[in-house]
Amino acid sequence: MSIAAAQFGTTASRPAARRAASTPAPRPAAVVAAPRLRITSRGRKVLAVLIALPVITVLGLLAMFSGGSAIASLGSSSTEFDYVTVQAGQSLWSIAETVAPSADPRDVIAEIRSLNQLETSSVQPGQRIAIPADLAE
């Protein structure tokens, strides 16, 4: 039986091998053209936003960094200043009343602080303060 089994196994594989050899080779498939890319209306909008976003960002940065530039002139300004030396016991309020008696002292103090770049309204004796000449009457 072992011989018959061996023969059966070999004979069974031979016809399959013969069938595989006798079948013709498959023909090459025809070249199929790839489908064309189709874009939807929503896809066009998304694509437009993706393209426009970097352009808008660059234009915004250019506008922000190149906006209004200050031009320095070599000539002197037409504003003239008078200087006052603070005496003992004087404050900006008393200086403002002395310099411009008809003006509101709060406005005069604001101009003096702005001109002298003072953070507070306190002044020290001996301190020299610039006063715009147009305030003096």
Image (tube, grey):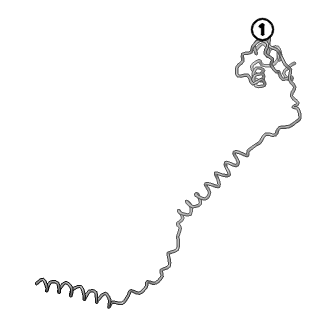
Indicate the quadrant containing the N terminus: top left, top right, bottom left or bottom right.
bottom left
Indicate the quadrant containing the C terminus: top left, top right, bottom left or bottom right.
top right
Q: Residue furthest front?
A: 3
Choose top left, top right, bottom left or bottom right for residue 70.
Answer: top right
Q: In this view, does 90 lie to the left or right of 35?
A: right
- x then y, percent, for residue 120: 70, 20
In the image, residue 21 above or below residue 39:
below
Q: Mark 1 points at which residue?
A: 88
In the image, residue 124 above or below residue 55:
above
Q: In this view, does 33 lie to the left or right of 2?
A: right
In the image, residue 29 above or below residue 85:
below
Q: Is mark 1 on a helix, strand or loop?
A: loop
- x then y, percent, for residue 71: 81, 40
- x then y, percent, for residue 105: 77, 18
Amino acid type indicated by mark 1: Ala
Q: Which residue lies furthest to the left in this view?
A: 1
**In the image, what residue occupies the spot 73% across and 46% down?**
66
Foreground: 12 or 53? Answer: 12
Number of callouts in the render? 1
Q: In this view, does 34 lie to the left or right of 20?
A: right
- x then y, percent, for residue 96: 79, 16
**In the image, what residue occupies the spot 50% across and 76% down?**
34
**In the image, what residue occupies the spot 82% across and 21% down?**
130
Q: Callout 1: few (<14), some (14-19), or many (20+) C-alpha neighbours within 10 Å?
A: few
Q: In this view, does 12 lie to the left or right of 46?
A: left
Choose top left, top right, bottom left or bottom right for residue 86.
Answer: top right
